[in-house]
Image (cartoon, rainbow, N blue to C red):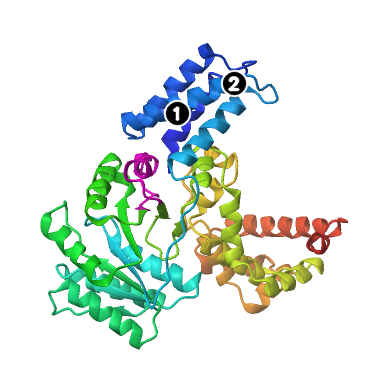
Amino acid sequence: MFENLSERLESAFKQIKGEGRITELNIAATVKDIRRALIDADVNFKIAKEFTDTVREKALGNKVLTAVSPGQLMIKIVKDELSDLMGGSESELNAKGSPAVILIAGLQGSGKTTFSGKLANYLKGRKGLSPLLVAGDIYRPAAIEQLKVLGGQIGVDVYSEPENKNAVEIAQNAIKEARSKNKNVVIIDTAGRLAIDEVMMKEVEAIKKAVNPGEILFVVDSMTGQDAVNTAKTFNDRLDFSGVVLTKLDGDTRGGAALSIKYTVNKPIKFISSGEKMDTLDVFYPERMAQRILGMGDITTLVEKAQEQFDEAEAKKLEKKIRKNQFDFTDFKQQLEQIKKMGNIKDLMGMIPGVGKAIKDIDISDDAFKGIEAIINSMTPYERSNPDSLDQSRRRRLAKGAGKDISEVNAYLKQFDQMKQMMKMMNKMPMGMGAMRKR
């Protein structure tokens, strides 16, 4: 995500690093390169020019500062301006009402239906609400079936009327259904087209008028760049939507949509989405995204993702086992499962400052833990609880059961033993895990 833009910006900052102060001369080349980087990322020229003009003015206005180096000051200015360009602060979802009604709009292929499922999962799991999904695409039977499949995966009811060809009636009937079943949020997935057409626009306008939604979210494929921004403007002129959702951020995207859309339609980006898994939906935080674009990482989001999977009671049990040097393979497997629930492994590592650049050319698959899990799954319950019992005979059996070479099993078990020793040493230190929590 934004890897090319990040590299170009880093290259631009190199021209000013090491300088004693900011001057008109040493700022000119840097600003020019920043503008080129934004245009290459598919940001509209007018937006890129206005952005860099503001950066230049602020940089020259701060030339009296001597507490930080010009390079550091320039990065801070660009970070602040990127954050402002993308909205400044996060925008909360309006999920209030009896029930709250959220209308989902966008072109076909933008990821509307998948996002509808992710939003339902988000509202159910993180907000404690009871959503109802509505199959409002009356033209594509596959869309109705897809929504039902997604609803089944996340345990959310789906309202549909496959024989009814009146999308407005379906939406109105769905709201009645939600009230009768005590559902407090209705998410209406509407029809899309391969391109904007009048029939589609009139239909979604009619649904809006009939159900008066508290939120209208425009879903846009971030990989379409400036085209996405132009489409958003057309939809906003007709629907006056309340927020934007950027999907497919895990693809080969240059970032133009994320950087331009708020400026163009003056509506906030509310969510970002990547992948097909139902838990890959995040609230959009402009400042955090600006930090990631500039290679600063995003520790705040990483910690929040960890906290979502954190169970304090289980953590206390685990700490006791570590203190007694009883950490075993069952514990380790549970930790792996929690990490996997946090999201894409490479994205998570990219949130650590300085790591994103180091791993940009490394292919880190979400299946990276499969080999280790296969070895653990080949163990008996006794072996999982007693790591020291794994003699060569048992290791050969594990290798055969996991489909691995004996050398791979030996290497993994050596790493596990080293990890246990490190945990043991950490708990002997004065500021161990328990002491840290008491502070």
Instruction: Say whether residue 262 is magenta.
Output: yes
Q: From the top left corner, tell me how far across and down residue 166 is, in percent.
A: 14, 74
Sequence-first tag of 2 and 1 = 1
Q: Can you tell which mark lies on residue 17?
A: 2
| Residue at (39, 81) in percent of width and height | 183
Q: Is 275 placed above or below 149 here?
A: above
Residue furthest bottom as drawn: 180
Q: Amino acid at mark 2?
A: Lys
Q: From the top left corner, tell me how far across and down residue 5 is, in percent.
A: 43, 34
Instruction: Say whether residue 18 is magenta.
Output: no
Viewer-side residue, 351 vs 99: 99
Mark-to-mark CA distance, 2 and 1: 15 Å
Q: Secondary structure at mark 2?
A: loop
Q: Secondary structure at mark 1?
A: helix
Q: Amino acid at mark 1?
A: Arg
- Judge from the rendering whether residue 11 lies leftward or rightward of residue 66; answer left or right: left
Q: Is 72 placed above or below 397 here?
A: above
Q: From the top left corner, tell me how far across and down residue 407 is, in percent.
A: 60, 55
Q: Which residues are magenta?
A: 246-268
Crowding at mark 1 (Cα within 10 Å: few <14, some 14-19, many 20+): some
Say if mark 2 contacts mark 1, CB within 8 Å.
no
